[in-house]
Amino acid sequence: MSSNLASTLEFPSEPLLSRGCPPQPPSYVLTATTDGSPSGMSYIVTSIVECITEREKGLRRVFRVKVRSETFQEPRQLICKVAFGRQWFRSLEAEALLYEQKLKPLWGKVVPHYYGFFRGDTYEGKTGILLMEDCGQPASDELSRQPLYFRKLLLEAFVALHRAGVSFQDSGLCFEDNVVIHYDPASDKHVPKLIDFSVVYPDHQCLYNHSEIVEGAPEPSLSEISCHLLWWTFCSSAVFIPRCVMVRGTPVPWEYATDAETLKAHCTFPEFVTEDAIERQIAAALEERARWEQEREECDYGPVRVKRERELDVSESR
């Protein structure tokens, strides 16, 4: 194929159609027209592995697919994000432009490798498909129960994203929606990748300027991070030691929560609080620290918890 031709994506029509619609051609051919897409490539979706998500009454879908191309020695399993209609087309096109511009230095490292944004007309109207690397599965457990090395890698990925000028709009760590887990043969480890940049601040100016993340250091304050969006991510990562325990709604430095006598000596209680109530509140704070330490002991050097991959045929993915 000549290098001055636009790249194309051939996608089977059946998985895209609503029930009861008239007969359609076996496949739709969409064309890449954005500047960042490699030119002159053809990609053919040979099978649908599964429909991962379906939103907005089917106008936004994500498929795991098998793809054949002259650029691959063998067929590959990739991800297709599909959008129908002008509103969702524009949203997906904006995400594609992020991949082609600000996210390009992060391809294959922090975010999936990007193969192009393809547009055309289908029975559902104006249609866009974003083709990218399949980076694995979601986690099967919350972030704090993943091993320490993984949590630190994920925090470093968020820092890299912010330095690229992009931030998720959710001020917390979007672990369930924006992180998948990928096995890296080079390191023989599972590593995180960031996905889904449909709801972001695309012109984020992050003031965080530290060069190293020190695991086991005290949890940083907002003034130390200088970015409230990233600070919430730091706090959610469980990479750091908490600064305090709570006793009667008052923070008490973590280092004092070693035993009841030491903790009580650093707390102030109103005169009307009974000794039994004080003992219960001290015990609750010590239990809080004990739970945290037990979780760290169980999880910091344990396995990465990944959801088991499911193989579905086309009929199951509707």
Image (cartoon, rainbow, N blue to C red):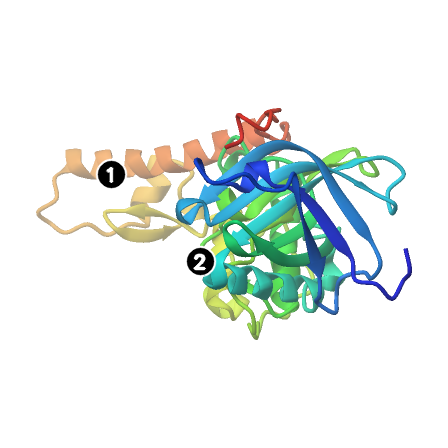
- Location of residue 269 in the rendering, given as x and y in whole percent from the top left corner: 19, 50
Q: Secondary structure at mark 1?
A: helix
- Location of residue 53 in the rendering, given as x and y in whole percent from the top left corner: 50, 40
The label shown at residue 281 is 1
Q: Reading the chain from its start, which is encountered first: label 2 or label 1?
A: 2
In which image quadrant can residue 312 be found? top right
- Location of residue 146 in the rendering, given as x and y in whole percent from the top left corner: 57, 35
Of marks 2 and 1, the one in the foreground = 2
Kind of residue sitting beneath label 2 = Asp
Residue name at image x 64 percent, y 59 percent: 119
Q: Which sits in the foreground, 42 or 198? A: 42
Residue that numbered label 2 is attached to = 170
Q: Callout 2: few (<14), some (14-19), or many (20+) C-alpha neighbours within 10 Å?
A: few
The answer to whether residue 99 of the structure is visible from this angle is yes
- The image shows a total of numbered marks equal to 2
The label shown at residue 112 is none
Kind of residue sitting beneath label 1 = Gln
Left or right of 70 on screen, residue 64: left
- Location of residue 39 in the rendering, given as x and y in whole percent from the top left corner: 82, 62
Q: Callout 1: few (<14), some (14-19), or many (20+) C-alpha neighbours within 10 Å?
A: some
